[in-house]
Amino acid sequence: MTNIRPQDDFYMHQNQKWLEEAKIPDDKPVTGAFIEILINNEKTLMKDLAEFAKQGVDPAVYNDPLFDQFIKLYRQALDTKKREADGNGFIKDYVARILEVKTIADLEKLTADFVLEGLPNIFSLSIYADMKNASINTLYLSMPNLFLPEKSYYDEASPAFTKGKLLLQKRMEIVKELFAKIGIDEADEIIANALAFDKLLVPLAKSAEEQSNYIANYNPYSFTDLESKVAPFNLKRILKMVVKQEVLEVIVTDPRYVESFAQIIGTDLSLIKAWYIVKTVLNFSSSGIGTDDLRKLAATYGQMLTGQKEITSFEKFTFQSLSDKFGDVVGLYFGHRYFGEEAKKDVELMVHEFIRVYQKRLKTIEWLSIETREKAIRKLDKIVPMIGYPDKVHSVFNKYQLVENKSYAENCLAFDKLAIAEDFATYKQEVDKKLWGMGAHIVNAYYNPNANVIVFPAGILQSPFYDFNQAKGANYGGIGAVIAHEITHAFDTNGASIDENGNINNWWKEEDFKRFNEKAEKMIALFDGLEVPGTNAKCNGKLTVTENIADAGGLSCAYEAGKSHAEFKSEDFFAGWAAIWRMKANPAYVELLTNIDVHAPTYLRCDVQLKNFEHFISFYDLQKEDGMFIEKDKRVKIW
């Protein structure tokens, strides 16, 4: 192990020993701080759930009828003998429904049915908060996903194109094998037609950069205007089946698609049907609700995409898919059984501490006018923190009842259909801002701009992010920086356009917003084109700007808050920051992330933010000859 000075490469200085010793699990493309906690959470929960599936849930251990329903489904999922006997006939039934489509009217009916069943569709309809009236749910329409992860994989001028060709070839080879296993004829013709339709979608799809612009998803169309755009589809008939009430406006996330829809739908119907068949087969095979041989075959595409050595085991995949589907229920179990109140109170205190730091900063920040500062503080004061686990669960869990004499696949499909119906029933209803977007066992955190809430599940509140007994500085450099990061999202390039009530609303003075955007451009330049060691990947500064702004604000805010504690040590803080971003990954996986992920690669998240942080620069007395030094005129300070 070479001696790397903190002044030259802090990430390697802190993580070198870990990187040399860490092993990427064969069934994952990556390991790191997040993954290590995730693996421990998985082991704990898988052990518990396997015991409950065999013996039932002892009410003295955990008493929740919703959890009991989940365990019944989990028990069915683990019954491989019964599932093999049930087979994959249900997939062939769906393909038969697609093949029966002869007219546009038939396609309308199929579209509505597939929306209600949560299946791949020529357009998707969903319910979400109206981004200009965030207290009320409204209807959104989006275009379908491409066969490849992002449109740059189709672009001959893109570095991703060569990999894209191989991926698409591999994916269609898998589809052909899946067809053979399920018993679907004329595979070559169907695949060729499906690819032809996918090619039509490519120029209409948003790039990852475009998708990262959250505000640009809000494109209201009057029903009359949208109806004319999607003709010859009868939109009124479709919405009557799906929403079951009058719709006057629809929010379109992909305007290019809608503007070209008449041309798309005018395509040879056989191309559209073929696309539906391929997408449906891939969906069911990847979901794992059929036989496991389909799931394993479909997973070989992911191996090529990420460099993962082995396919996830049946037991682990079953846990991952069902704990995700029943996230509220499993998360509540995890939170109640494994998350302590002492930790919750400590984290809550940190949240309020960071808000106070931001209040102080916003009152004195020099580049903002008094009027804009006051509005920013008002937004900050209305942020609601949610820590540990939720107070309530989605209504679908109270209504779902497993039917014992139905197959696992049938019960899963029934749950999905019920969940979608519950969502559509909330159209034009008040948004329930207490619902969480992920289970409490998940190793993550998020800011929801339309609810103005920050959420920190119990799953992430573990070492190295947080430990009640570890050094104060390490906690502030770990979970503290993550918490402050999520707060800063309220003021990133997306959050800056949303007010304290979650509505798109320009609350800035014009000259202030101009200065903010100039600073954001400097943040883009700070990261753009930087290479990730050991890979061919380069950071996309524009794609990652929102997260980089949040990282910079989070790092700075957490440090300032930590300094107020007598036991706080700067070296612990910086070590804690480096520890949470440690990651060892297959180069293919890193390259994939740089194409699609709004987060910068973790090596850069650690080092570039520290290079840009005045307290790190002064603590280590960085000089021009040091590897961590960057010129003062390139440094960016926003919040």
Image (cartoon, helix red, strand yellow):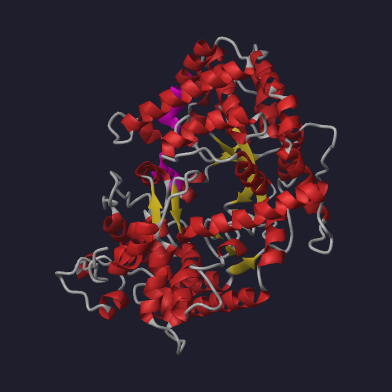
Specify the quadrant of the image occupied by residue 348: bottom right
In the rendered view, does 66 fall on the left or right side of 462?
right
Measuring from the top left, give residue 368's x and y in whole percent. 38, 72
- Residue at 52% of width from left, 22% of height from top? 175
Q: Is residue 360 visible?
A: no
Q: Which residues are magenta?
A: 197-212
Magenta region, main secondary structure? helix
Outermost residue, bottom side = 566
Measuring from the top left, give residue 455's x and y in whole percent. 59, 63
- 201 in magenta: yes
Q: Is residue 102 visible?
A: yes
Work out which quarter of the rendered image holds the N terminus and state it: bottom left
Work out which quarter of the rendered image holds the C terminus and state it: bottom left
Q: Is residue 313 above or below residue 370?
A: above
- Residue at 74% of width from left, 52% of height from top? 51
Measuring from the top left, give residue 580's x and y in whole percent. 44, 64
Q: From the viewer's side, name the closer residue of 423 and 439.
A: 439
- 39 in magenta: no
Specify the quadrant of the image occupied by residue 185: top right
